[in-house]
Image (cartoon, helix red, strand yellow):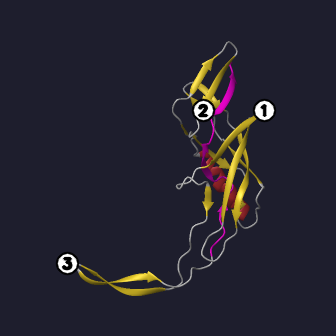
Amino acid sequence: MKKALYFLVFLVLTLSFTPVLSAKNIEIKENPNNYQVTIPAGSLFEALFMYQISSEYNNVGDGVELIMPSALKYGDLTLIEKDTKFVGKIIKLQRAIIGQNGYVQILFDEIVFPDGKSGKILAHVWTKENTGIIGGDLTQHTKYKKMPHYIQGIGGVAQLIPVGPRVMGTETYILSGAQFRLVLDEDLSLVLPKE
């Protein structure tokens, strides 16, 4: 039942997926037989996790793959073909502990095209804090104490102040088919053949 649910989530995400490239100043040099493309550092790609990973059972060094389910175009030029993979590994991982949820941090260092050719890439998963860490949130406190608080013009109110220890954290799971953004840490250079 669980596998069927994961497949359904993956299918829905794949069918509704629209790749996004957020980049400025893409350089394209036209040669007689090819285009030389440079996508600058800081550009964002959207891709899907190919299989589930978790802070519960994965380890530092485990491989991770994301896939582009649709071609990524810039004007009429296809920059990244459908089914291109971003390959990386877990560089930091912490299991859940008291006070903090488990987390993973992934670094991507290879791009593999559908024809089997590959190239170097340096990218990380985009997060709000720009750390590349997925999970790791602090957990709630176990106890709170009411403290009087006085606001001028309003009067006394009760404010809850955390006083107890934090609860046990939960493990972080990234499901197969989950959509994430990758941020380029270095310029990505591609050589695209003319058709």
- Residue 27 versus residue 170: which sits nearer the camera? 27
Q: Amino acid at mark 2?
A: Ile
**170 relative to 16, above or below:** below
Position in image of residue 136 (x %, y %): 61, 65
Which residue in the structure is indicated by mark 2? 39
The quarter of the image holding the C terminus is: top right
Residue 173 lies, in percent from the top left, at 66, 63
Q: Is residue 84 visible?
A: no
> Any magenta on residue 194?
yes
Q: Is residue 73 left or right of residue 64?
A: left
**Along the viewing direction, whichever of 18 and 194 lies nearer the viewer:** 194
First along the sequence among labels 3 and 1: 1
For label 2, the SS is strand
Residue 59 in which image quadrant? bottom right
Q: Tell me where residue 181 appears, x and y as whole percent.
A: 59, 47
Q: Residue 93, which numbered label?
A: none
* First along the sequence among labels 1 and 2: 2
Q: Are marks 3 and 1 in contact (CB under 8 Å)?
A: no
Q: Residues within 10 Å of mark 2 (few under 14, many from 20)?
A: many
Residue at position x 52%, y 29% in the image? 25
Find disc 3 in the rendering and name its residue: 153
Q: Is residue 63 above or below residue 195?
A: below
Q: Amino acid at mark 3?
A: Gly
Q: Please state if 164 lies on the left or on the right of 135 as rendered.
A: left
Q: Residue at x 53, y 85 (%)?
A: 164
Quarter assignment of residue 188? top right
- Count numbered badges in the picture: 3
Mark 1 — residue?
Answer: 117
Q: Which residues are magenta?
A: 169-195
Q: Residue at x 65, y 50 (%)?
A: 11
Find residue 153 and report its image quarter: bottom left
